[in-house]
Amino acid sequence: MGASLATRESDLALARRAAAGDRTAQRELFAAQKTAVHHTLFRILGNNRDLEDLVQDAFLEIFRALPSFRGDSTLTRWCQTIATRTAYLAISRRKPPSVELSLVEEIIASDVNTHRVAQMREAARRLYAAMERIDAKQRIAFALAVIDGLSLAEVAQLTESSVVAVKTRVWRARKDLMKRAGKDAVLAGYLDELSGGEA
Amino acid sequence: MSEDPKLGPPPVEPLSDVAWARVERGLWARMDAAPEPVHAEPSRRRWLWVAAPLVAAMAIVFLVTRDRSDDHPPPEIADVRVVAPATASTTATFDDAHIELAPASAVVMRRDRPATLLERGSAWFSVAPRVDRPEFTVLAGDTTVRVLGTRFRVARSEERVTVEVDHGRVEVQYRDRVQILGSKQIWSSDAPERVENLPQTAAVPTPESTDPKPEPTSVEPEPKPEPTRVVPKPEPTRVVPKLVEPKPKSTSDLDQARFEQLSVVEKTNPQAAITGYLEIAQRGSKWAANALYAAARLASDRRDPRAEQLLTSYLTRFPSHANADDARALLSRIKR
């Protein structure tokens, strides 16, 4: 899905003003892109813990790198690429967790939606906990392609990799996660569902 | 369990408004702290290509503006960010407005229109009558304050905004809601549908306060009338929004206020400033000498042909005034 010429031109104009140090343009850019940047970071990291700092880190890097924005992609996609890079650095710096996964909480609420939301939250928690233990690049590829539902080409753009590399990472991540799921039926079932039965 | 519909991917949990406010505040603080956070590192080869035409363009602009003494374009105002130190207030002027920033407050003044953005803290804005110029605007979060000439205070604490009008009238737009505030009235984004009167005896909150809340505690409560007494008691004063300053001022006070307004106008509209100064000079208040000198000095700066006559007139009328020596120096420079 290509962006219109007008969007590209307005992106470029805004980027140039912001790159020149125009604080108003920087604020405009921040307001326009903050949701997309947060979305990407959240998808990769799985929760809002530490995300305030990471959003700041991402935007600092965005403003630093703005002079290199040429309008080849939309500003949103370009910002998401930097957000992905920020997430990668954050994951690389983290120590792997030492705590084992906990058991599924007993759901008391009888309402079907409440039950489903609780199930999904628990499954997502387990999934991201398992993702903490796999390779950072595989994790990012999996999060963007499988959880967020982006195409391999889009993930390749965000991760600045080839489509083949992304495909391999997603496949390896899925395999690794399935192996880690082991007897955890909740996680295995969730992985299977997210992968469309390919797991 | 196997009958359950699919769970789907986990939703992206949004950050709260307060969290976003923290992010934004932290980001700009880090941007300010960084030495050169947003500028590209110029390539060694590229700077010459940029610098040469730039220098040439600047030279042309300089020559053109220097020769056309009667038609100076207003100086271009760049976006300017003013940050008050943590422990002291600071002042700034922008497009005929005087801004008093409370400690640790920050405003950004727009380049392309008379608008300022209150990033954090609070500030008093004294805006001279706009006459036929565009309205002056203050932005603070989701709140926009439009003004045609007044003194008012805007305070911001994260996403909460308070607007307080000392005199004059402002229009406050908060999201889709618009409120008009008159003299001694206050509005808060906490209750955007309400405009409240400030008690007339209330001390005007100092700009040093970074707390956006109004300070009505300094108001003495009105004494309750004693039912047994027949002594006539003055009507409790109700504050009604007014478009003009309620208390009368002396000519000298008015001239002083006008003089201060004109000193702000000098950069943007020097001809109007000279005319205004000369009007004050004709009235004969204690500001006449300052005004006549200011007119002469401004005319001299602009190579206005009236400069010599004005300086001579000033020295004739006020030969021992504080600026007399400067006036003589200017006069001798013109005659040289």
Image: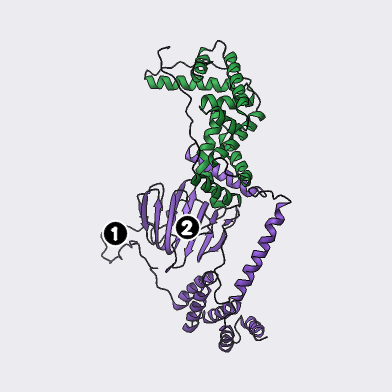
Mark nearer the N terminus (1 vs 2): 2
Rendered colour, chain A: green
SS type, badge 2: loop
Q: Residue lying at the far top in this picture: please name it.
A: A183
Q: Does the rendering let one see residue B118?
A: yes
Q: Which of B66/B278 is in front?
A: B66
A196 left or right, relative to B301: left
Question: Amino acid under label 2?
Answer: Pro
Question: Amino acid under label 1?
Answer: Glu
Q: Is residue B185 above or below residue A56?
A: below
Find disc 1 in the rendering and name its residue: B226
Rendered colour, chain B: purple
Q: Is residue A182 above or below residue B43?
A: above
Whole-angstrom CA distance, mark 1 to mark 2, is 32 Å
Check disc 1: other Cα within 10 Å, few if <14, some if 14-19, many if 20+. few
Q: Nearer the viewer, mark 1 or mark 2?
A: 2
| Image location of residue B309, percent across then percent down | 57, 87
| Image location of residue B325, percent across then percent down | 65, 83
Chain letter behind tag 1: B
| Image location of residue A132, percent across then percent down | 61, 23
Chain letter behind tag 2: B
Q: Is residue A151 above or below residue A64?
A: above
What is the number of the mark on residue B205? 2
| Image location of residue A128, percent across then percent down | 56, 23
Badge 1 and badge 2 in a common chain = yes
